[in-house]
Amino acid sequence: MANFSNQMRLSSTLLRRLHQRVAAAANSSSSRNFTTTEGHRPTIVHKRSLDILHDPWFNKGTAFSFTERDRLHIRGLLPPNVMSFEQQIARFMADLKRLEVQARDGPSDPYVLAKWRILNRLHDRNETLYYKVLMENIEEYAPIVYTPTVGLVCQKYSGLFRRPRGMYFSAEDRGEMMSMVYNWPADQVDMIVVTDGSRILGLGDLGVQGIGIAIGKLDLYVAAAGINPQRVLPVMIDVGTDNENLLKDPLYLGLQDHRLDGEEYIEVIDEFMEAVFTRWPHVIVQFEDFQSKWAFKLLQRYRNNYRMFNDDVQGTAGVAIAGLLGAVRAQGRPMIDFPKMKIVVAGAGSAGIGVLNAARKTMARMLGNTEIAFESARSQFWVVDAKGLITEARENVDPDARPFARKIKEIERQGLSEGATLAEVVREVKPDVLLGLSACGGLFSKEVLEALKHSTSTRPAIFPMSNPTRNAECTPEEAFSILGENIIFASGSPFKDVDLGNGHVGHCNQANNMFLFPGLDSKCPKFKIASLCSFILSLLLTFFPPNNIFRTCFRIGLGTLLSGSRIVSDGMLQAAAECLAAYITEEEVLKGIIYPSISRIRDITKEVAAAVVKEAIEEDLAEGYREMDSRELRKLDEAQISEFVENNMWNPDYPTLVYKKD
């Protein structure tokens, strides 16, 4: 009888819960709510005492409440004053200002590297506070944790290394990577940034020291895109180095062998990809700073089978397309006029070809996505490399550049020939846009800029996008002084706006906030000044602080993650670029502003990531994320997709910690 009564009470409870759920569903049918998976829920930890204080993922420092201090056995191990987030940040900032100069390791340690050291120490002891500081001061500290300071860090990494962060796979680990990947403590990894150190920024082959670029990029993924820092993994694949200085350096931390090449190289990357996707099937892998000869090959090899993309090829292209679309609007034309724009491109490396392919696809998409549209789009580009204008008469044309080689009959009508100089091409073509991806500083000479005066556009656009700053094809002062105020200027390097007098300002749009680094061309006459890079980088950062951060790779990564898309499609990349371009107001574009400011970074991320999710749904690639399966995802309207994205962006808040014995 007791059992029967218990069963009746249980049945009544279940029925009541069922009725409550039905009522709740009915009440919320018109307004759906999506609880964040990164919300304020207690976190179970399996360590106490000094162990918890030495764990940067869970350490709160002086912010531990007395209740937590008792629960975690740390009462008495910290000063008694429980400090708020705001107090901790104020204390850190005061220390930072005081220690910036004192932290230098002698006169060779630049000012910006001293800042990096202090921030890195905070990162080592308290990740949550570190990201809180970074997010609230992102304009000041993004160039410290990433470019250009990360270039100095990578150059000096063997001496700066103190504690491990990320994973290292090497040529010596062949056959062992499948087991090695389980040495990483996180059971879930959402984002991997991987490099082989072969083409770090504009600095060339830095070998194993290039892991600094992966660490810095993921720091910005966390701050700008809300990826959970406990689910990111920076990776270095060390296949040797061809940097003779590193091969002879007794303190170098990497393999002191020349780089693998050919099939041996491919086998190492194949093994790595198989290993990480075996353990984390839904991870996204971003390739960063691979030399040009491998960038396209690896992208084409993996993109249809893995969730991966190459930032230098596709991320660069995305932000360039956003700028080009913004330029159309700034010229007083609708974005649909983009396929009519004449574009001269200086540079045919991996970044240049990536931009060309993406721009061509975007034009074709606007023209109806037919074969005729695709061919029509091709005719809008004139590509100039170190040998001049690329035409069908050129012998041994790079296969990736071949589709953009101009037909002889076309150029003869324009008075041009194979190998025509950049100035000649600009003078005869009269382009709407002059796009620099050459990594050859000063390439947009006075002669080239004078030639652009003949542009048929009422407001020509100049995009010297190469980085670091010494590689910029021209400065804004040069462009505005020669062409006047009625131009659109966007650079890959950070420059200040130009005072044109009479209250007029020449706006300097930064095309990628230090993140765009085309490969150095050894034929470029500026190539040999690399030895001055450390000094120049620190000097330029002091005088030219960046003012924008909107690299589309962050939004692509977040949108791909939340959609659960099987691959990163061209459509998703284009959707990100188009959304970014449309984000700018009409008032801004009329002033020549074509990229948003850093102050709106998280809101921009939400909107662009939502556009990527929407595109993944439309292409039937979305498989859902966590509790939101693909069917539920397809039911969401645009506002609900934005809400879903926002709710799943990580924020640096201290969770309540609860100890549980293993």
Image (spheres, helix red, strand yellow):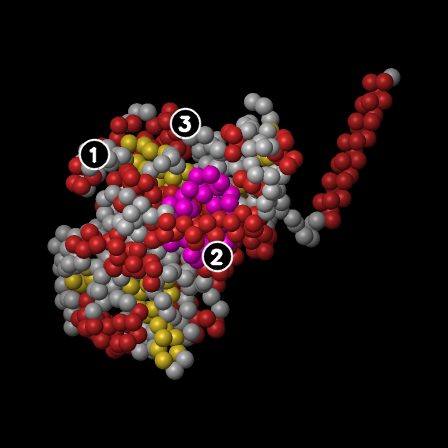
Going from the N terminus, do you reach mark 1 or mark 2 first?
Answer: 1
Task: Name the element at disc 3.
Answer: helix
Residue in view at x 80 percent, y 28 percent: 11
Secondary structure at numbered mark 1: loop
What is the quadrant of residue 14 in the picture?
Answer: top right
In this orientation, which residue lies closer to the viewer: 502 or 421?
502
Which of the numbered marks, if any, corresponds to residue 250? Answer: 1
For the residues labelled 2 and 3, the Cα–Cα distance comes to 34 Å
Q: Is residue 4 visible?
A: yes
Judge by depth and name the residue closer to the eye, 662 or 335: 662
Which numbered tag is attached to residue 601? 2
Badge number at residue 217: none
Q: Nearer the viewer, residue 43 or 636?
A: 43
Name which of mark 2 and mark 3 comes first in the sequence: 3
Judge whether 155 appears above or below 364 on screen: above
Residue drawn at point x = 37 percent, y = 27 percent: 180
Q: CA distance from mark 1 to mark 3?
A: 28 Å
Give how far across and how far down residue 540 sits, in percent: 30, 60
Q: Nearer the viewer, mark 1 or mark 2?
A: 1
Q: Quadrant of the N terminus?
A: top right
Please tell me how crowded label 3 is: few (under 14), some (14-19), or many (20+) other residues with Cα within 10 Å.
few
Specify the farthest residue to the right. Answer: 1
Residue 69 vs 227, above or below: the answer is above
Q: Position of residue 252 (x, y in %)?
A: 24, 36
Q: Amino acid at mark 1?
A: Pro
| Residue 380 in the image, given as x and y percentages of width and height | 29, 65
The residue that disc 3 covers is 183
Range covered by the magenta-colored residues: 116-145
- Identify the main secondary structure in magenta: helix
